[in-house]
Amino acid sequence: MREPGRPVLIQGGMGVGVSGWRLARAVAVTGQLGVVSGTALDVTLARRLQRGDPGGHLRRALARFPVPDVAERVLGRYYVPGGIGPGVSFRPVPRLGLRANHARDELAVVANFAEVFLAKEGHDGPVGVNYLEKIQLATPAAAYGAMLAGADYVLVGAGIPAEIPRLLDELAEHRPARSSVTVAGADGHAIGIDPVRLLGHRPAPLARPRLLAIVSSHVLAAYLARSPVTRPDGFVIESPVAGGHSAPPRGRMTLGPSGEPVYGPRDEADTAKVAALGLPFWLAGGYGTPGGLERAWAAGADGIQVGSAFALCRESGLDPALRQRLRRQAASGTLRVRNDPRASPTGFPFKVAEVAGTLSEQEVYEARPRLCDLGYLRTPYEKPDGGIGYRCPAEPVDVYVRKGRPAEEAQGRQCLCNGLLAAIGLGRHRAGGYDEPPLLTLGQDAGFLDGLPDDHRAADVVARILQGATPHSGAPEVPQGRDLGPWPQPGPLG
């Protein structure tokens, strides 16, 4: 039975910057859970400040950061009054790495604080932040910044977030917090943050946000729920048709005639087994309609997570011209979204929306020089001399091979970091007049557009789903306000 205060609808966290503060805020004011993407917020903040911070929103948020000196240092490094001129490249930000970097931590904390602060400003609806377990090097500092701004939820996918419950507990008490980092060929590495050292004092304890683990199977949900140390507060169960990354098929990957991974019955989560864990859960991937919500309720879920319908709404962070092109193609039935098994450097299948002029076109992909200058998806590895190196399958093939990996792993890989930043209008201009082309992603089920007005708003998505669904016997009442009272936790599992 659903407890009061849990959202029925979760707006999915879509990076880079697609689910920014404007979108999350627009959803949260309806009483549902608005979620900002926490991916690469350091570089998005830095680039928006270099664009002159139109509207002054980021500077307004930074003025509320609890330690003014920290915010002032970030502004001093990146803010350009009036914005950089046409054809001027962005100033780079420190890259993620295992070696401590105080300036990098300050930027990450401030950036996550600003995004959550703006999403929560002026209302009392619930706001969450979404992180990727694949980007372990970013999580401690990023989560701390979001918690300083009062994030109500943290959602983590793209991996097994077994250490996140402990991390959130430590950060809420401003204790030094560390999280393990997977290093190829070596064990025992971690990344962390010391909140007191960063802020210069120990503030009052923070409210600890609820953790929702984004998983694709009941097996992984059961693994996380087995112990209080790893147990989240709930789950988002994501199907393979959801936008962005998806889990690979279980067992050996088989490709169909179109070159996409083939999923079978083993890849379907058993919702009855998830429900038996005693934790709330939401279903995602092809559920963004009134009928989808009804199916989720019938399966015992508290509700649904919706991404693509919000990605195409007016408050989305997508570049407006690209968003309109995506929407027109989706509405006309001419948009193809392929689940590309090669595009992502992570090795996870990634949904690529086929739109002219983007990296989905082979000629655009081939014309782009291969380089990796942002590095969010780099993998740390131990070098023969015992030092730590970083490699990414999207970097130049010869460089990748010199780092000990076969050339085949690099074939067809896309630079998601640069491509997704270009999709929100923050692509980098490079010497010689070269501008980074965008990369677009969306869910594969376009039924979410049915019944939505042209150029729809986030509130239209919420209203269509919640008002169109027919509650069955025992279905939850839809919350209209904020209620973050305690959720009962299940006892030890057998």
Image (cartoon, grey):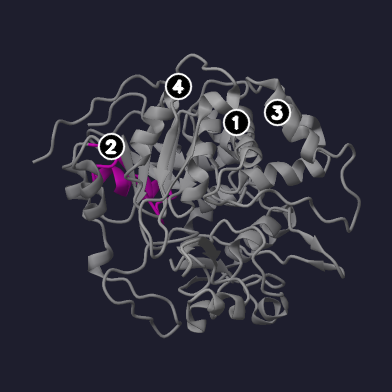
Q: Which residue is labeled 1 in the image?
A: 113
- Which amino acid does the dot numbered 1 rest on? Phe
Q: Is residue 388 magenta?
A: no
Q: Nearer the viewer, mark 1 or mark 2?
A: 1
Instruction: Please report whichever mark, 1 or 2, sits nearer to the chain's N-terminal start.
Output: 1
CA gap, disc 2 and disc 3: 37 Å
Relative horizontal placement of residue 252, taking residue 185 as reference (left or right): left
Q: Amino acid at mark 2?
A: Pro
The residue stretch that appears in magenta: 279-301
Q: How far is mark 1 from mark 2, CA to CA?
A: 27 Å
Upstream in the sequence, badge 1 or badge 4?
1
Q: Residue lying furthest front in this view?
A: 385
Circles 3 and 4 in contact, beta carbons < 8 Å: no
- Left or right: where 46 falls relative to 195: right
Q: Position of residue 127 (x, y in %)?
A: 50, 31
User: Does residue 374 appear in this view?
Assistant: yes
User: Residue 234 location in percent, x, y?
Assistant: 31, 38
Mark 3 = which residue? 71
Query: Residue 280 got which mark?
Result: 2
Three-letter code, disc 3: Ala
| Quadrant in the picture for residue 145 | top right
- Which residue carries the number 4 mark? 482
Q: Where does the image place residue 138, in percent across and percent down from the top left?
A: 52, 46
- Indicate which disc, 4 or 2, sits on the residue closer to the N terminus: 2
Q: Is residue 277 left or right of residue 43?
A: left
Query: Can the viewer see residue 120?
Result: no
Residue at point 37% right, 25% down? 5
